[in-house]
Amino acid sequence: MIRGRFQFRSLRARLAAGYGGLFALVMALVVAILWISVDRIGGRDVVQQMGASSAVFDRLWDQRAREMQASAALVARDFGFRAAVATGDEATVTSALDNLQGRRRADLAAILSQDGRVMGRVAPLEKADVARLWDSLDEGKMTGVVRIAGRARQVSAAPIMAPTNIGWVVFATDIDQRELDSLERLSAIPIHAGVASSAPPNPAWTMVAGDIRLDPAARAAIETSLHDQEATSLSVGGEENIAFVKSLPAMVAGERAALLLYYPRSEAIAAYRPVKQIVLLVGLIGILLVAYASLRGARRITEPLGRLDRAAGRLAEGERTVLAVEGEDELARLAAGFNRMAEQIEERERRITELAYNDGLTGLANRAMFQRHVDLLLANNTNQLALFCLDLDHFKTVNDSLGHHAGDRLLVEIARRLREAAGSCFIARLGGDEFVVVQPLSGERGEVDRLAEAMLGAVRQPIEIDGHHIVPGTSIGVAFAPVDGKDVATLMKAADLALYRAKSEGRGVCSFFERDMNERAQARRRIESDLGIAIERGEFELHFQPLFDLADQKVCAFEALIRWNHPSRGQISPVEFVPVAEDTGLIVPIGRWVIEEACRRAASWPAPLRVAVNVSSIQFRRPGLGEQIVSALEASGLDPARLEIEITESVFLDGDEATLRQLHSLKRLGIRIALDDFGTGYSSLSYLQSFPFDKLKIDRSFIQALMTKPNASAVVKSITELARALGMETTAEGVEENAQLMALIAHGCSSVQGFLLSRPLSAMQVDDLLRSKGLPVTGRAERATPTDRAAG
Ligand code: C2E
Ligand code: CA
Ligand code: CA
């Protein structure tokens, strides 16, 4: 395709070719026009010269014709001459004519008489010539060109009157080369001259003076030029001539004559050759200049564009690029615009990466970044690392009770502390209150434990948010690569299981992944699905553990403790399934069943024996707890004063007024409220001011420590004293040894509970125990073996 051949790959070539080509074309056109004009001017000049020459020739012609006519008239009037002609005195006539001919330098001087005689020097006149002349004279034509003996002659005549016309005096001069030469000499340029004539019977133009030969084309040219009086082109001897043809007056009818002036075209143009050369030279220089300027101009435009093009390429490859901005033209603005655009792209990319890989709230890496990071680390098989999975304890409670703003502030602060504690380790927030830390292992002893301790310690520092005193806590699960998993997903699952274990171990601890955790996780899932149908199937049962009043020295209450008799797995501990029930919300219907069952059982016991029921904080958060208790009391007919509710501090983490109002209204009904597991929570003492508990249950851990840790005794003593000061009772949990009992008596504890006195008993065992004491038990009585110690 033709187009294809002219398609340039570069804009520069296209511009240069386009503009250069256009300018060169214009230049060439100008040169061509000048060139042709110069030729024209040359031709016109020659034609003008020829016009001038022909005018000169006209004047010469006229002058000679007049002179010859004047001489002829003079002779014709001479009396003697007339008489000689009239009488036919040839000698006298001839002598007079000779005389005249000599003076006039005429080629021919003769008398043509009316009767047809010819006298004087008539040669080379022939008879036919004489007859033609006589006819013209007779018609009154006295001057003109006549072809005589093949040559053109100028003829002038005058009539001889005696008194009538008896004949004519005729003079003729040859229009010869001499004459033409003088005409040529008179011209400013060396033009050539000739005379052509056409006479019957052959009308074709022939040269009668001047020595050129006419070809048919030349003859035709003469004919047309004579007709429209324009300069023409005449080929003479193969050379092109500019020619000018002028008609000469003919004397004889049918004859025509013309003066021919011509000049070789090459010579006409030759005069202008230097001009043409200059035009050509100027044109060539112009084209070269234009080509150079086009190339330069194109480069000026395309060079910055080329730079822009290359920069755009680099930008596309993600390289940082800045263009130099020179000047203030469009290209400079384009470069500046490009720089701005590149900057914005960079900024936006940075933002996108930030958004994609960072957690907006804490500024830590996010899950995607974590994934990438660990993937990279794991790609290298030799890397060994520890993955810490952290989950804040009771974060949901903070968030729900203090609001998301407080929750966010807590997260930001925890993130800051973790970053500090984690040092150079990678840290990310996966969402919610979940954090991960990746520690590359160097093989140094205890490095994992140290990091775990550092993080636990850092998180544990108290913090005040919106006037609330919070002691945060976190549980940590750890998994190791490559032993526990070779990819992120497996590792995360393992660390999660370890975390779950840490949480169920009482939170605030770190636990490591073990192989059997997977099985336990499966077990938990089974529990979840089985729990839902356990109530309908009647798989739950309440056991009751006696509380022994130290002042009265007898059982004052029983704590209801739930048991799950799983059809295939046997008895499942509440430690195992209560947290699952709390997580799934199933604790609400289960708790309701516990309250009803406990009230029903207790109603059969003799007053004032009480029943203590554990109520989860989840139950407090759902509406309807108060109604449930009231209806259970009503259904069973149990005196509210014989019902004791055990709550843990987690109930207060909600911090809202509703919980307190609920507790107050329960208390107003006469129901007793006990604070369970006292001493293990965040800020146990502060809650004592917010609500008037009836009892504090000192946590088992303090009782266990009584004999081993020196300050445990002081702690227990101060708790009992504080409780007494606030008008509260105390119950020591988990009393297993006599020494503990003795210490508790010494510290002034109100009541004790534990294996030392009695393990939790089935309802039937309780009835048996009560009956054995001789106490009246209403309802069905079944025999069972009571624990001896409880009886004691
Ligand atoms: P808790 O309220 O602190 O209950 C006392 C737990 O200590 C009982 O475990 C009891 O068997 C155990 N215990 C009593 N004396 C001793 C002792 O001398 N030594 C030791 N080592 N342990 C002793 P259990 O029955 O397994 O209950 C565990 C926890 O399950 C309870 O702790 C309570 O928080 C929860 N729980 C039990 N029943 C219910 C219930 O009906 N509703 C709710 N919400 N939670 C319940
Ligand atoms: Ca309890
Ligand atoms: Ca307890």
Image: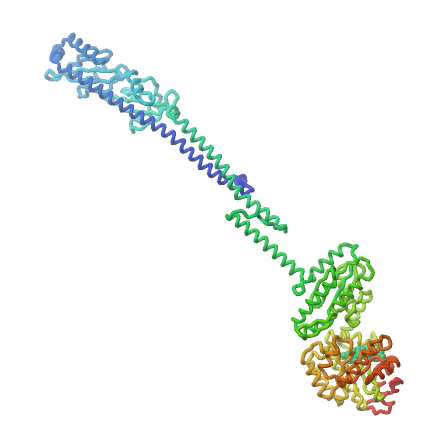
Coordinates of residue 575 in the picture (x, y in percent): 80, 75
Q: Splitting the image into 4 quarters, where does residue 555 fall? A: bottom right
Q: Is residue 311 left or right of residue 535?
A: left
Q: Splitting the image into 4 quarters, where does residue 208 fall? A: top left
Residue found at the far left of this picture: 163
Q: Is residue 530 left or right of residue 351?
A: right
Q: Is residue 19 above or below residue 212?
A: below
Q: Is residue 132 above or below residue 781?
A: above
Q: Is residue 374 left or right of residue 227?
A: right
Counting the numbered discs, the total is 0
Name the image quarter holding the N terminus. Answer: top right
Depth order, front residue of 371/416: 416
Name the image quarter holding the C terminus. Answer: bottom right
Coordinates of residue 508 in the picture (x, y in percent): 77, 70
**Residue 595 shows in this picture:** no
Q: Is residue 45 above or below residue 385?
A: above
Depth order, front residue of 2/254: 2
Ligand 1 is found in which quarter of the picture?
bottom right
